[in-house]
């Protein structure tokens, strides 16, 4: 069933390395391809194995030319309030939410940020509200728990369907959250999914 939309919007995806052994070719790109086929939603997918690559692509995403790709998907390993670049063994591999919000300061109007990483959202809600105020994003979402990759992949199909089929307004984002919890209820709970909306109580 095709739902009407005011305009087609896309996903801007940045993906880290999941294994230090480069012969393991795991990627979430096939999920984006399914969403593209079913919803006709375009996507940009880039790999980032270093901090420099990550921040380079974040700068690209915030440019006006990519305003039709308002959903940012950050697919990395994660820990509490951070994502991990590369194999995660060095302190330089850790990128905190504070670093991300400083880099995207005021540049995320009418955009949504999704952390496809373990535990990144396992922090005080006030910190996430601060993240939204500084970046000007409409919402941020992700997981509080360690997540199984297969289950999170199944959940992402439901998640992106919801993020792509409502308006980019506070009312629309609230409708997205309701749809996510209605369609992915048990997975939401198992993965510790959390969505924080700008201006919501």
Image (cartoon, grey):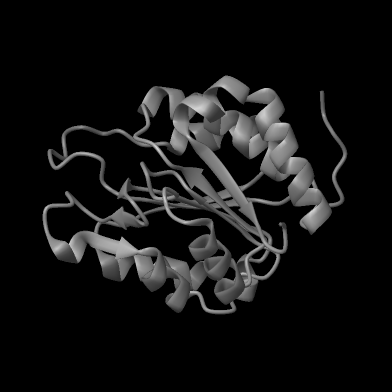
Report if residue 178 is visible in the image: yes
Residue at the location (30% across, 49% down)? 79
Which quadrant of the view contains residue 94? bottom left
Residue at the location (59% across, 79% down)? 106
Residue at the location (16% across, 34% down)? 23
Task: Give the total of numbered labels.
Answer: 0
Task: In the rendered view, tell whether residue 143 sits above or below residue 128.
Answer: above
Q: Is residue 159 left or right of residue 119?
A: right
Residue at the location (47% across, 25% down)? 190
Task: In the rendered view, tell whether residue 98 sits above or below residue 17.
Answer: below
What is the quadrant of the N terminus in the image? top right
Q: Is residue 55 left or right of residue 188?
A: left
Q: Position of residue 48 (x, y in %)?
A: 31, 57
What is the quadrant of the C terminus in the image? bottom right
Q: Position of residue 151 (x, y in %)?
A: 44, 23
Q: Position of residue 78 (x, y in %)?
A: 31, 48
Task: In the rendered view, tell whether residue 135 sits above or below residue 154.
Answer: below
Q: Is residue 105 left or right of residue 48?
A: right
């Amino acid at each position: 069933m095709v739902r009407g939309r005011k305009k087609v919007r896309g996903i801007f995806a940045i993906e880290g390395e999941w294994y230090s052994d480069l012969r393991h070719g795991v990627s979430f790109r096939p999920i984006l391809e399914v969403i593209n086929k079913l919803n006709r939603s375009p996507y940009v997918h880039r790999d980032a194995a270093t901090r420099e690559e990550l921040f380079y692509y974040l700068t690209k995403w915030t440019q006006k030319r990519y305003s039709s790709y308002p959903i940012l998907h950050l697919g990395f390993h994660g820990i509490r309030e951070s994502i991990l670049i590369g194999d995660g063994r060095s302190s330089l591999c850790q990128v905190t939410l504070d670093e991300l919000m400083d880099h995207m300061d005021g540049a995320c109007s009418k955009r949504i940020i999704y952390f496809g990483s373990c535990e990144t959202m396992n922090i005080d809600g006030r910190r996430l509200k601060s993240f939204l105020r500084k970046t000007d994003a409409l919402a941020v979402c992700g997981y509080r728990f360690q997540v199984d990759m297969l289950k999170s992949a199944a959940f992402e199909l439901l998640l992106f369907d919801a993020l792509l089929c409502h308006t980019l307004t506070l009312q629309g984002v609230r409708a997205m959250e309701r749809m996510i919890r209605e369609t992915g209820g048990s997975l939401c709970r198992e993965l510790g999914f959390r969505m924080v909306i700008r201006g919501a109580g």
